[in-house]
Amino acid sequence: MSSEQPLFMSDETVKSLLKWETLIPAVEGAMRDLSKKDVLQPPRLILPIPSKNGALLAMPAFSKSESALGCKVVTSFQNNQEKGLPSIMGTILFMDSETGKLKVIMEGTEITAWRTAAASVVATKHLHVGEKKILAILGAGTQGRIHALAMHHYFQFQEVRIWNRTESRAKALCNELGSWATHYSNKERCVRDADVIVTATYSPTPIVRLSWLKPGAHINAIGFGVKHHNELEDEIYKSESTVVWVDHMEAAQKELAELINNGVRMRGEVGQAMTLSHAQTQSSNITVFHSLGMAVEDVVAAKVVFEAHKEKLQAATRPSN
Ligand SMILES: NC(=O)C1=CN([C@@H]2O[C@H](COP(=O)(O)OP(=O)(O)OC[C@H]3O[C@@H](n4cnc5c(N)ncnc54)[C@H](OP(=O)(O)O)[C@@H]3O)[C@@H](O)[C@H]2O)C=CC1
Ligand SMILES: O=C([O-])C1=[NH+]CCC1
């Protein structure tokens, strides 16, 4: 019997090993593999805890091509900000995919933030046709911040605008990010003329209106909150020019059932869109990526981090010439 103990990796260690250059391709591969049915990923279990304004989610996945097996347990507690804690906190159990033996217990708060932004980058790359000059981000919390960093890293936006319900947080975030980010006190002005929009809030009511959107705009709607689709007004879904994409159809059928029952058609998964050329998408369409978040993104991200950790150890023990 192997007596090897599982490794524990804190969020601080995980963060030091996360790089957009390795994470974005890994998340892109995970989204593609899922749509090719090369991933085992059941709909996640969601345990709502209404009295605490919270929820616990259990998210297992196996990626065949990456031989990556794991399960994330993540909580979402909306009132944590006032307690000085992140709203979303996760833990990932990463297993040996040959034996099922636990290899790493990884804090998954950083991975959840980074991989969600990486998925939005991938969706934007494959769904948005036109030039990417203006990015508008609604929400200056963990997700607003990491989306600004990921999008700024990957695309050459000329303007990055950030609006937040509490204006001082948008200002503070823009100060932290530097001169490439500008805070907006009015969300309509923030969104008008934007090529790409990210909604990253817990808003229970719509924060984006159809009339503000320019033809061809792309929205990454990532908020979870009470219902997944609260951040966008119904007119956006009803518009004939809107095309809605998701990360996982099976999960959407469950988690976006209300939208689907109201007649909103999900065009498909981002992983399926990867096989279409941009020429097949109308450039005047408004595209929406409804990001639910997928376990396979967490599992491949955990593998990227574990591999980087092993490389670092090897480099440290390699004899220098
Ligand atoms: N799709 C996915 O895979 C994932 C989705 N998420 C979702 O992303 C969203 C943001 O998460 P995160 O950044 O970690 O959370 P944070 O707590 O860090 O930030 C929350 C943000 O929501 C804003 N907000 C809260 N309530 C309202 C409201 N009523 N109206 C407008 N804005 C509001 C806050 O504004 P203020 O500063 O004024 O309080 C803040 O900007 C959540 O819905 C979360 O569930 C998170 C992880 C993964
Ligand atoms: O996929 C995920 O980890 C989450 N989605 C919504 C809250 C956390």
Image (tube, rainbow, N blue to C red):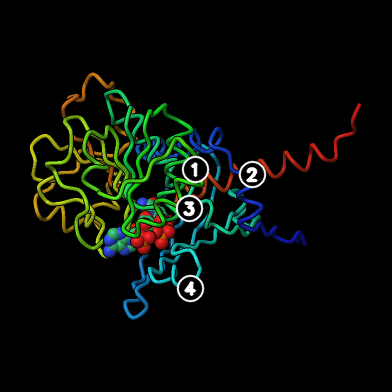
Question: Which three-letter amino acid code belongs to the residue tagged 2?
Answer: Leu
Label 4 belongs to which residue? 83
Q: Residue at x 32, y 37 (%)?
A: 270
Query: The residue tagged with tag 1: helix, strand or loop?
Result: helix
Check disc 2 and report the residue beneath it.
17
Task: Give the x, y percent position of residue 230.
Answer: 22, 57
* Quarter of the figure with the N terminus: bottom right
The residue carrying mark 3 is: 112
Residue farthest along the bottom direction in this orientation: 51
Please tell me how crowded label 1 is: few (under 14), some (14-19), or many (20+) other residues with Cα within 10 Å: some
The percent coordinates of residue 288 (x first, y second) are 24, 41
Tell me how far mark 2 sits from mark 1, CA to CA.
21 Å
Question: First in sequence: mark 4 or mark 1?
Answer: 4
**Separation of marks 4 and 1 at Cα, in angstroms:** 24 Å
Reply above or below: 106 against 24.
below
Looking at mark 3, is its residue's CB closer than 8 Å to ligand 2? yes
- The tag earlier along the polypeptide, 4 or 3, is 4
**Distance (Cα) linking label 2 and label 3:** 14 Å
In x, y percent, where is residue 80? Answer: 44, 70
